[in-house]
Image (spheres, helix red, strand yellow):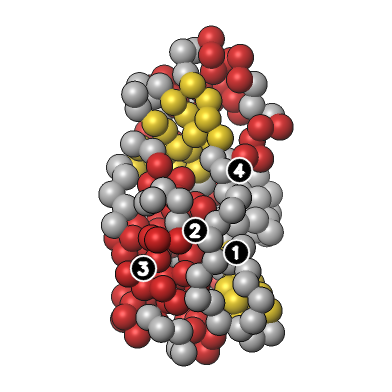
Amino acid sequence: MKKLFIIQTNYIPWKGYFDAINTVDEVVYYDTMQYTKNDWRNRNKIKTHQGTQWLTIPIDVKGKMHQRICDATVSDKYLDWRKGHWNALQINYSKSAHFKTYYSEFENIYKNDNETNLSKINYSFISLINSILGIKTPVRWSSEFELSGDKTEKIINLCLQTNTTEYFSGPSAKSYLDNSLFENAGIKLSFLDYSNYPEYNQLYGEFIHEVSILDLIFNEGPNARKFMKSFS
């Protein structure tokens, strides 16, 4: 049995994203899809004393309505976005129990990486977080494959070209993925469950699950995996 998860690169994603990666045998980053504004590709939330705050990478979209995720780049007008994001993280997490443990690793990316391609920026953070969590799932990119057909057919093509026997998708895909097409291709279709996550030590009042995994890492450090599903 080979388990596959297909996802786009997201910016400092939440814990469910990394549970999905850790659940399967291989991940394909589908960044040849069309870039969508106001989505998780270029932004995520952190927790502050005033509630949640968006951290958004400013992307050049003028005249590029149909650009692919892998072609999206930072707007020339906002090349200093890294400084603002890093300042926000320091202000809101400097008092968390394990911020100092990982401070230098994240600071290095925010201060010393001048990459402007969104996919590469996202992957640099994803790779660091995988390393911190001990996730070693192999990664491939959709650009490596020949894809055709509609959305579901392309996914099935990826499964077949990677010799996948079980494909994992997020729960929202239940509304549009046709299970019979996967069955006809000899592929088991499974959906991830993002419900009933345990709470952990979190700053600033009422607990919020839907924030970047940096919140979990900075607050729980080496114990972060205990509050995720794929490590239990």
Circles 4 and 3: CB distance less than 8 Å? Answer: no
Q: Sequence order check: which comes first, mark 3 or mark 2?
A: 2
Residue type, numbered disc 3: Asn
Q: Sequence order check: which comes first, mark 4 or mark 3?
A: 4
Circles 1 and 4: CB distance less than 8 Å? Answer: no
Circles 1 and 2: CB distance less than 8 Å? Answer: yes
Q: Sequence order check: which comes first, mark 3 or mark 1?
A: 1
Q: Is residue 58 left or right of residue 32?
A: right
54 vs 93: above or below: above
* Residue 209 disc label: 1
What's the distance in space between the residues labelled 4 and 3, CA to CA? 37 Å
Disc 3 marks which residue? Answer: 223
Considering depth in this image, is 207 or 107 the residue closer to the camera?
A: 207
What's the distance in space between the residues labelled 1 and 2, CA to CA? 9 Å
* Residue 15 disc label: 2
Which quarter of the figure has residue 176? Answer: top right
What's the distance in space between the residues labelled 3 and 1, CA to CA? 16 Å
Disc 4 marks which residue? Answer: 34
Q: Residue at x 63, y 69 (%)?
A: 208
Mark 4: secondary structure: loop
Residue type, numbered disc 2: Lys
Residue 173 makes an appearance in the image: yes
Residue 103 makes an appearance in the image: no
Picture quarter with the N terminus: top left
Mark 2: secondary structure: helix
94 vs 105: above or below: below
What's the distance in space between the residues labelled 1 and 4, CA to CA? 28 Å
